[in-house]
Structure formats: C-alpha cells, structure tokens
Image (cartoon, grey):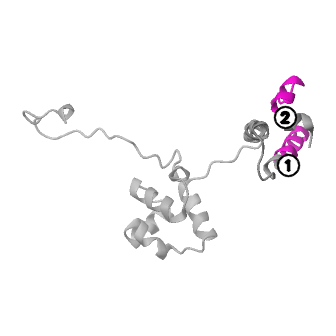
Amino acid sequence: MSKTLADPAEMIRRGTPRLLRSDEELAEYTRTLFSLTSKPKPTAAEQEAIDLLTLLVEQYETLRYPLPEARAVEVLRLLMERNSVSQGKLTPVFGFQASASLILRGKRQFNRGHIARLSKRFHISPAVFFDARSAIPLRRNIKRKGPPRQGLNARSF
C-alpha cells in the first residue's frame, strides 16, 4: 500500500487523490482501499482515506463501467432464481396467483403494496423495483363526476 494513499493529509500535499483516469490508477486505489478496510480498527485519518478512495473508485467505475438498467420484473425473476422461490410462493405478496402470473409476464405492473412486500420478503431496498416503465405516480388527478361538494374544501383537512 502506498503511504501517500494511506494518509489523507499526505495525499493532498502530494497532489493526490485525484479523479481516476485509468484502470491502472483504479487498481492502485482499489489495492489501497482493500488494505485499509482490512484493518480491524482504522485510525481517523485512515477512515477518511477509506471514505475518499471509496468515492473516487465508485465515481470512476460508474462512468467507465455503467450497469445496464434492469426492468423491475427482470429483477424479480433474478431474485426468485437466486433464492429458489417459485411463483406460487409469492402468492401472499401479490394477493392472487393470477396477479403474480400477470406481473411476471409483463401484462401488469407492480403496485406500491407489491413493492413493499417484495422488498421485505427479499430484504432489499424498494428502489430496485422502480424503473421508467413501471413508474408509479405519487399523485393522481382524478376528475369527479357531478357538481363539487358543498362546504368541504380538500385543503381544509
């Protein structure tokens, strides 16, 4: 491990760290990061170096090696496969066997309840089930039929 990378103050004095520009720099920063994180009790300076190197490595990898976006149903299929969960075992999550089938075939979208129960079932963030195609609107503008109600204002609640 480079002593320069292990000490944040020394990094700044020597002109590092800086944004990564090559896979060779990525390899060096990663080796240093692994070395620092393997310590049972890193010092405050080492923890600062860990945080800084983590940000730089993540930024480089995100730009250099972007992950393709997955549809929510593809994520569910992968989770089912990895956890050996059959469609039938997800019936409580979706309420009905037919709902699970329609969602897995792409004929129906997840609703908020499905996402909440799936994230709890697989112990993951609900965010993994959100994608552009399955966006759930936070508000709906529902037009009422007939005259407006007298004496009640929606903002008064």
Real-space CA distance between mark 1 and mark 2, rounded to the nearest whole angstrom: 13 Å
Mark 2, Cα crowd under 10 Å, few <14 / some 14-19 / many 20+, is some
> Crowdedness of circle 1 by 10 Å Cα count: few (<14), some, many (20+)?
some
- Front-most of 28 and 40? 40
Image quarter of residue 63:
top right
Q: Which residues are magenta?
A: 8-33
Which residue sits at x=54%, y=59%?
Answer: 73
Residue contact at pointers 1 and 2, CB within 8 angstroms: no
Image location (x, y in percent) of residue 50: 77, 41
The answer to whether residue 150 is left or right of residue 58 is: left
* In the displayed structure image, the side of residue 23 where residue 122 appears, left or right: left
The three-letter amino acid code for the residue at tag 1 is Ser
Camera sees residue 108: no
The disc at residue 46 is none
Residue 76: within the magenta? no
- Residue 9 is situated, as x and y percent measured from the top left of the image, at 82, 28
Q: Secondary structure at mark 1?
A: helix
Q: Main secondary structure of the magenta part?
A: helix
For the question of whether residue 43 can be seen, the reply is yes
N-terminal of the two: label 1 or label 2?
A: 2
Quadrant where the image shows the C terminus: top left
SS at mark 2?
loop
Return the mark for residue 7: 2
Q: How far from the left and from the top, in percent, is residue 23? A: 88, 41
- x and y percentages locating residue 32 in the rendered image: 86, 44
Residue where numbered disc 1 is placed: 35
What quarter of the picture does the N terminus occupy? top right
Residue at 43% x, 66% y is: 93
Location of residue 83 with respect to 129 vertically, above or below? below
